[in-house]
Image (spheres, rainbow, N blue to C red):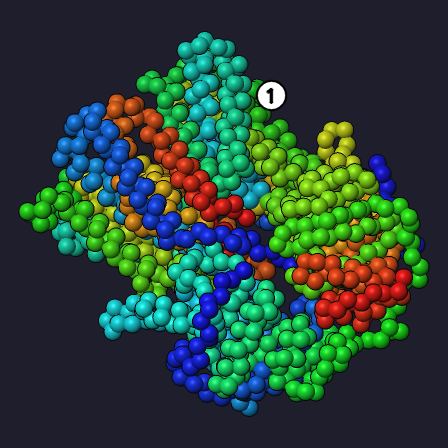
Amino acid sequence: MSTVAMPSTRRLVAPRFAMSRELTLVAVTLGLTIVVGLLNHDFVGAQNLRFMLLNSVVLSLVALGQTLVIAMRGIDLSVAPILGLAAMVCGLLAQTHGLSLALALPLALGIGLVLGTVNGLLVATMDIPPIVVTLGTYSLYSGLTFLYSDGTQVDAVPPAFAAFGNGHLLGFLPVPTPVIVLFVVLALCWYVLRHTGFGRAVLAVGNNASAAYAAGLPVTWVRVRVFALSGTLAAFAGLMFLCYTGSATVTAGTGDHIELQSIAVSLIGGTAIAGGRGNLVGTVLGSLFLSVVLTALVFLHVPPIWYSAGEGLMILAAVQAGIGRRGARA
Amino acid sequence: MIQLSTATPNDGTPVRQHAAPQARLGARGIVKQFGPVEVLRGIDLDLRPGRILTLMGENGAGKSTMFRILAGQLQPSGGELTLNGEPLRLASPHAAHAHGIHLVPQEPMLLPELTVAETMFLGRLPMAGAIFRHVDWKDVRRRAQAVLHMLDLDIDIDRCAKTLSIAQLQLVECAKALLHDCRIILFDEPTSPLTSHEVETLFKIMRHLAADGCTLSFISHRTEEVLEISDDIAVLRDGRLVDSAERGGFDRARLLSTMVGRTLRDIPRREASYTTDETVLEVEGLASEPTFRGIGFQLRRGEVLGLAGLVGAGRTEIAETIFGVRRPTGGSVLLAGETVTGKPCHDLIRKGLVYVPEDRARHGAVLSMTIAQNVTSGLLERVRQSAGLLSDADETRLGATAIRDFRVRCAGLDQPLRELSGGNQQKVVFSKWIATGPRVAILDEPTRGVDVGSKEEIYELIEAMARDGMAVLVISSETEELVRLCDRVLSLYEGELVAELSGAGITPAAVSASYLGRSKVEGAA
Amino acid sequence: MSALPRIGAHVAADAPTAKRRRRFLGMGGWEFSLLVLLVIVTTGFGLGVPGFFDDLSGFLGMTGNFLPFGIVALGLSLVIFTGGIDLSVGATASLAAVVAAQLWATLGLNIWVAGLLGLVMGGVLGGINAAVIVFLRIEPLIATLATSFIYTSAAVAVAGDSPPSGFPEAFNNLGSGALGLGSFQVPYQLLLFIPLAVLFWLLVGRSAFGRKLVTVGYNSEAARYSGIRVPRVLAAAYIISGMMAALAGLVLSAYYSAARADMGDVLLLTTIAMVVLGGVSIFGGEGSMGGVIIAVLLLGLLRQGMLIAGFSDMVTSMLTGAILIGSIAVRNIFSTRVGGFGKRLLALVRRPAVAVPDTTRHDAP
């Protein structure tokens, strides 16, 4: 008889666990900010705080989508080229043909939706593991960006774009537009995950796809939609990237390996790679934490070469902490 | 242990939306085959509203399979289902839900990260809102709380499923059935992990549901329970319905004899016993809480010792603990006088103790490799040439001898194992371990999923092993198998040894009685 | 060699089948199709694309462009056989190469000794991967993802502001030189790759370790029950993968006569594609080394042919990605679950009132 690998009398209470992860992140981020601020007052100056906040927005947007995919026990490596493609297409069209921001938005979302859906269809209907699919589409979508740009790049964006990426929506509030946008997107994603049938189905599939199927949930459809959502968010992040940096090159997204960063940030935020639960707020906090850490390294004059290593170590620490709490894995 | 609240179960809590409409579920001539193995051979059943029908039978009789067909999880190979007289086709579990059929599975569905409340509403979350459809969590929590209250369970609905024990999960599964508008509820061995008090609570609910007009069916091994709760009883044996009666028409004796079936004279017994005096395996006070405790026995060279008991009694766990895959919480294991308690399994294999697991596809055989590769996988060290490569000639010799001696039907040594029938796969797994020349072989369900012809061949192989001086421990759920093979039989019930039978005292009735009816029967030496 | 104990009194009338219907060189249907494809691609490009096959030496010389991938693929196959994955191969290649180069440049070590130490470094890096996976019990995907970050950082740090370059001619020959055999020029890379390929082929197909590897990948529980020491097997796989990655890094640095920290970036996608195309299941437990070797040649020559024909690097990358996806898709469609694809598409359109056979692997990321 198969033994069920479950603890018999453990008294872990999960909701409290999730809370402590977010609180830990906030505490550590605040602590780090204060400590570095004591060493260098500019670190806690208004300009730098704004910078650190803004700097994390693009990654947060991508990571939100990645978190949903991971919660469903998948992985999406193609978010980087999707981001790059959206940024490049919108940027070039704006630069050379005067595309308005109002049109750029649905265009970007459309690109992400289509590319993400392709991922989802390949995973769900052809039974190909997500890592293989998204590894393949990574190169395919990168190629598309390369072909479309044809050697050019985006150097300037119309004022509307720049305002979207750097301005203040509500003039009197010192909160930059992208942050507000992120907040709205986070709220939407959180609502979808927590309160819609689709969101609960995503978690059910991530927990136990066979049980979800036996309970009548449309597993294939759920898989396709999650990848579509991830692609859409990545493309939206691409538009945001374009507006924030005012430029786009062929290596936008892929150069920084934003796909790996989005995975890292999701893990740090408390989402388990095995799926079944997704901590969206944790992901955003994790992205902010990463931004603060990287900026701190700059302020402390740590050579940039060690940034990557720091990320790697943080991933290990975050995953290890998760394992330690949950107990031995089967 | 589950904390039970002191409040009495609440009768008449409006947990269900409305009283269940009557549903009479019928099955006519249901046949089910898995490959060459026939699990169900023409079953007729009549589940009537307001009544509880209990299916009884030994392991492998086909009860769970029948339930899964009734719940749309499996498709019958033949026969048909009817609902209130009309033909019923269940293409999927979803379709079964639509007809109000709910199956409480034998092993609870594991969704570790979801809360108890959400698990209970899997796939059927109540939604609210006209424009933006969202989950009605208030309704979820209210109804989940109410139904747990009704079952007298003190489980926090906001806890994650992974923090619950198996017994708690099982009860939550039962609770699920009460939540939705099910009119036909099938309980597949719900009482195995429960204590008698918890069982009483479950029975109260079942009676409540039956009074409400629901159609209930129930699988259990415990004869007292069955006699207490059932309105109708149907006994399955070897995939056939062999007896059925209404309340009052059965007593314990009749139940047992019907389930077991054959009389002693039908089963060929072993001609001779090869037991020597040399003790080769000694187990003392072995325990792995909470699954089993106080296990002690001796196994001698040439002896075939059987371990009988219900699924879940702990037999496989004992074998795994002896083999070193599971950690013991107490006790000791001695192999030829040497203490091997808690040593890892590769050590035990080297010292001459092998374990052939019950789930051969998972544990014993590598289906993607060829026959020859599987046969030699236990002895890779000995097949090596000087260059470090595996000797082709040795592999061929071993493989060919195995195929010949074990009469494996195959197309050749290089055939992938997955292409063989179940019985032949099993033989290859056996040959792999026998080739290592062990002192002790633990065989867990050696003929599970094997066709009748191969079964007999495997029995002969086991006899030959004993004759050759091997000590064999056979774990089996088929009483006939134990009667056929064993010099002695130990019976296990809920983790404890409850009986020992030997020699002529090993009869099908005695074996079954020893662990089914929870009575102690001492056999004559 | 101990004989089988005599089991059973019966001795079957027919003598044991001593003849073995062995597959030629251990190749099955998949490997054979790959071989056919390889022939088609080679002749196709040879005939259709000028410059592809001018003479044998030129043709062989082309292999130097893709054999480093092949070297990595050999080692990576071992890891994938066990059901794991090594995302850090690129970073390992870079780091090992850069370390070796710095040992030569700043410490003045003999280039070959430095190279050897670079190989050792690769093994150590692989060992770290194994340790994280086995002792910290972190999934290979995450573990090697994290270590790839760390190794990349280290590579950049070691490379410094001016990465070492200008290695001795003898060393550069390893990457770009060739040995004259009569009138032919055989690249040293090829002379390195062929024995390695044979070695790995024997290792996986004919050695005890290879059997254990496949068993662990097929089902690590089954391997454990069979007495295989799973942690040791895993450690060996990752260490060898690291060493092969390091070797590839060294070959690359010989080829370019420079060692840069981003040299290995290109390696990952193509090598995974080579392994998967070669028929090794991404879940482990299945596949053959022969298939991988053919896939290396196939993808490599395909890529070279396209480059010579004028396609850009990007396009060939895209093609590699498409082949990666396509090969598994084709395998799945033609596997035992024929028709599964069509049914699943239908499942999207219709709500599951139809009994779609749920044969997806639900537990793989």
Q: At 89% across and 46% down in the image, what residue appears?
A: B278
Q: Left or right: where does residue B159 sit relative to residue B434?
A: left
Which quadrant does the N terminus of chain A fall into? Answer: bottom right
Q: Residue furthest front?
A: B6
**Residue at mark 1:** C181
Q: At 57% across and 64% down in the image, what residue appears?
A: B107
Q: Left or right: where does residue B259 sit relative to residue B279?
A: left
Q: Nearer the viewer, residue C252 or A161?
A: A161
Q: Left or right: where does residue B515 sit relative to residue B136?
A: right
Q: Residue furthest top?
A: C108
Q: Residue furthest left?
A: A172
Quarter location, residue C347: bottom left
Q: At 42% across and 58% down in the image, what residue appears?
A: B159
Q: Left or right: where does residue A101 sit relative to residue C208?
A: left
Q: Amino acid at mark 1?
A: Leu
**Does any portion of residue A265 appear in the rendered image?**
yes
Q: Nearer the viewer, residue A320 or C292?
A: A320
In this view, B299 is above or below C179: below
Total number of numbered discs in the rendering: 1
Q: Residues within 10 Å of mark 1 (few under 14, many from 20)?
A: few
Q: Residue furthest bottom?
A: B85
**Does any portion of residue A110 appear in the rendered image?**
no
Q: At 53% across and 73% down in the image, what residue appears?
A: B201
Quarter location, residue B486: bottom right
- Residue A99 on image: x %, y %: 14, 50
- Residue A14 on image: x %, y %: 40, 53
- Residue C252 on image: x %, y %: 46, 25
User: Callout 1: residue from which chain?
Assistant: C
Indicate the secondary structure of the residue bearing disc 1. strand
- Residue A248 on image: x %, y %: 22, 40
